[in-house]
Image (spheres, helix red, strand yellow):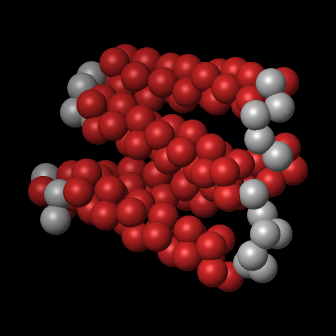
Amino acid sequence: MKPLFDFLLKLCILTVVLWGVILFGLEPGSVDTGSVFVAWIMIFANTVAGYLLFEYAFDRESQVFTIAVFGGLVFRLLLLMGLVAFIILRDLVVINDFVLSFFAFYCIYVIVEILGYQKKNKQKKIAA
């Protein structure tokens, strides 16, 4: 299976499981799902962007790879910090639910992103 398709498939499965837990595993009304959704969409987009940058830079020379992956990481984190600050300052969400779900989603999705990187690297070694 192609690494990008495999990554997106795992991401979708993880998303369905996480949302299943949020919607059916928690007591109804205990969490503001709108706040959780905003955090999820930000982290989901961040993870997909990060993996796509990695895919773009994977077979490029070392300097391009470093700029794309690490420069992309810095840009994505700055963008996320700006969005989080904007959302909190404008009081657009329930802050406790948003921040908790933001960190939880970030920790979970960054693991999936790193596993996607490792799988891509393994497939290249096997092909070589």
User: Residue 34 appears at what percent x and percent y?
Assistant: 66, 51
Residue at 80% over, 54% down: 97
Residue pictured at 12% horizontal, 56% vertical? 127
Q: Residue 120: image x %, image y %?
A: 29, 53
Left or right: where 89 falls relative to 111: right
The answer to whether any part of residue 85 appears in the image is: no
Quadrant (top left, top right, bottom left, bottom right) of the N terminus: bottom left
Query: Residue 13: horizontal and vertical position, in percent?
Result: 40, 70
Q: What residue lies at 39% left-to-right and 50% top-to-bottom?
A: 117
Q: Relative to 104, say whether 43 is above or below.
A: above
Residue 82 lies in quadrant: top right
Along the viewing direction, whichever of 12 and 65 lies nearer the viewer:
12
| Nearer to me, 12 or 5 | 12
Q: Residue furthest front?
A: 29
Which one is in front, 32 or 69?
A: 32
Q: Is residue 18 above or below residue 3?
A: below
Please state if 44 lies on the left or on the right of 40 as rendered. left
